[in-house]
């Protein structure tokens, strides 16, 4: 007679080593710029990853979030992607855009994306545990550009005679901390003046208004 000692069932847990890298299109934007965040979630295997969820909590320095890829949803200040599948050796790319808001007291610009769920075990990180040293989450910080501009206007003589030619000088200064670009200045000339000439720096006259545009003023410099 044959002897049968029975069968031993072997269970092999599925393992998916997930990592996340977050980047932004511009780390030093201007206030009002639209910037794009990109989150890449990769799977080093050895198993395919299913049921992957990613969360990105937005700081109060960002607004008008749009163009959220891959079916992501925005609730209050939290972006969430769920039900993602990532093959072994593959990755998924998540993107969205946001508008940079003005700096101020209590306004922040650092946001952290992290993997919050996965059907498979991750050998070197735990989803949704907010541990910054793990490879399934990554912060990104932007630094909005700030330029403290001031303007002083003078005239070479404050008591001219009728018919005299006077020269006005406008000095725009930048106390920084960043260089100022795209600076525009307007000067509305009253009807007590005529024959405006010698306009410097490419200024344009339209009607009684002189306009300078596209000026650059270095930090701690002037034009």
Image: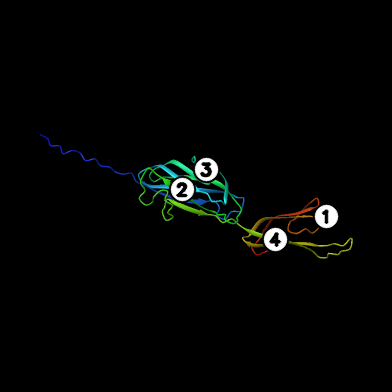
Residue named by callout 4: 150
Return the mark for residue 74: 3
Residue named by callout 1: 190
Q: CA distance from mark 2 to mark 3?
A: 18 Å
Of pointers 3 and 1, the one earlier in the residue sequence: 3
Return the mark for residue 72: none
Return the mark for residue 40: 2
Badge 4, how many Cα within 10 Å: few under 14, some, many 20+?
A: few
- Residue 159 as seen in the image, left or right of residue 99: right
Of pointers 2 and 1, the one earlier in the residue sequence: 2
Q: Secondary structure at mark 2?
A: strand
Q: CA distance from mark 3 to mark 4?
A: 40 Å
Quarter of the image for the N terminus: give it. top left
x and y percentages locating residue 161 in the rendered image: 89, 63
x and y percentages locating residue 31 in the rendered image: 61, 52
Of pointers 2 and 3, the one earlier in the residue sequence: 2
Of residues 154 and 210, the one nearer the viewer is 154
Name the mark nearer the viewer: 2 or 1.
1
Of pointers 2 and 4, the one earlier in the residue sequence: 2
Tell me how many marks there are.
4
Name the mark nearer the viewer: 2 or 4.
4
Of pointers 4 and 1, the one earlier in the residue sequence: 4
Badge 3, how many Cα within 10 Å: few under 14, some, many 20+?
A: some
Q: Give yes or no for contact between labels 3 and 4 (Cβ–Cβ under 8 Å).
A: no
Q: CA distance from mark 2 to mark 1?
A: 58 Å
x and y percentages locating residue 197 in the rendered image: 81, 58
């Amino acid at each position: 007679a044959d002897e049968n000692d029975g069968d031993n069932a072997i269970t092999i847990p599925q393992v998916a080593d997930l990592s996340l890298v977050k980047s932004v299109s511009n780390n030093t934007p201007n206030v009002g710029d639209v910037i794009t965040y990109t989150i890449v979630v990769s799977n080093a295997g050895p198993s395919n990853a299913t049921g992957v969820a990613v969360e990105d909590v937005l700081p109060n320095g960002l607004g008008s979030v749009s163009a959220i890829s891959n079916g992501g949803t925005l609730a209050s200040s939290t972006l969430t992607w769920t039900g993602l599948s990532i093959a072994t050796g593959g990755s998924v790319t998540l993107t969205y855009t946001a508008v940079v808001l003005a700096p101020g007291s209590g306004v922040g610009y650092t946001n952290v994306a992290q993997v919050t769920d996965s059907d498979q075990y991750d050998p070197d990180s735990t989803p949704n545990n907010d541990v910054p040293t793990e490879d399934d989450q990554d912060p990104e910080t932007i630094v909005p550009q700030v330029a403290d501009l001031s303007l002083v206007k003078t005239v070479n003589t404050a008591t001219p005679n009728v018919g005299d030619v006077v020269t006005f000088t406008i000095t725009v200064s930048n106390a920084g901390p960043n260089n100022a670009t795209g600076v525009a200045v307007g000067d509305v000339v009253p009807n007590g003046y005529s024959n405006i000439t010698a306009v410097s720096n490419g200024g344009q006259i339209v009607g009684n208004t002189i306009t300078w545009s596209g000026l650059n003023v270095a930090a701690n410099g002037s034009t």
